[in-house]
Amino acid sequence: MKLLSITQSNTKVKKSMKYFDEYKWNAIKNANVKNPDYASLSLMPDYKICGGAKSGGCMDLCLKSSGFAKVFKSVNIARQKKTEFLLNDRIGFINQLDKELFNFNKKCIANNKTGFVRLNTISDYPFYKTGLMQKYPNLIFVDYTKIAKRLFEQLPENYHLIFSFSGRLQYSNQVKLALKTNFPISVVFKCDFPETFLGRKVIDGDKSDLNNVLQYNKIIGLKFKEIDKKDYELYKDNGFIVHENQIELYNNKFMNWHQVFNMLTK
């Protein structure tokens, strides 16, 4: 079973490449980035591999139901098989992933490219604990996460995270933790992007996933991707999506706390 998808035919990947800011990467990270290539792993979202999904409310409106998965059943069937492979034979899965990363890295070096890897395309599994990222220092790994404590861990130098926002009450402590850091915070809006949110400037994050990890102390604005209308009506108010009439509410909720926190820690 092949785990990684290594292609630029995907619309989202092509867009990421088109707007990729090589100068900014090299200026900020001193990474000697050039001619990027992209590999990704798509598992089937599951509470066992998406630790923050229950409190964050993202499972109900997950991207597993969008894009090609809406049209081709085979997409989610393949994701499910990969997920079962990971859950039932973790060692075998990691060994297979290691082989594919080795080949991808070898290809990038041979073609004078910088390889970017997203192992959690629509999941939130702690692959950074497997040692694979440290094994391939030439590759740059990027992910979104709903588990704020990861932002405080000793992460591999070539691993870059973006925290994912939710306005649910039971997720508030996660957001408060993330606001203590300068990590980018992604927010799904079902309205025009505001200029600021949670006291941070909002940038258009739909242009390039690869640039988003460099947007320190900023909000990564993402447009809500339409899924099944029945599901949307059921879950539209679950906190995962920010509507225009909620922006001020969330700003007051989190900024009042954040201002007090800043005063106490000065």
Image: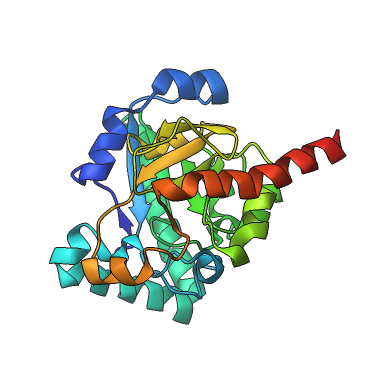
How many marks overall?
A: 0
Q: Which residue sits furthest left? A: 71
The quadrant where residue 76 appears = bottom left
Q: Looking at the picture, does residue 228 appear above or below residue 15?
A: below
Coordinates of residue 249 in the picture (x, y in percent): 55, 49
Residue closest to the eye, 83 or 94: 83
Q: Looking at the picture, does residue 93 appear above or below residue 11?
A: below
Q: How is the image coloured?
A: rainbow
Residue closest to the eye, 136 or 50: 50
Residue 142 visible: no
Coordinates of residue 12 in the picture (x, y in percent): 26, 43
Residue closest to the eye, 241 or 125: 241
Q: Looking at the picture, does residue 170 appear above or below residue 185?
A: below
Coordinates of residue 145 in the picture (x, y in percent): 53, 54
Residue 124 visible: yes
Viewport quadrant of the N terminus: bottom left
Coordinates of residue 106 in the picture (x, y in percent): 38, 42
Is 77 displayed left or right of 93 in the figure?
A: left
Is 231 displayed left or right of 219 in the figure?
A: left
Viewport quadrant of the C terminus: top right
Which residue is drawn at the image coordinates 51% and 31% (left, top)? 214
Q: Which residue sits furthest bottom? A: 88
Which residue is drawn at the image coordinates 33% and 72% (left, top)? 234
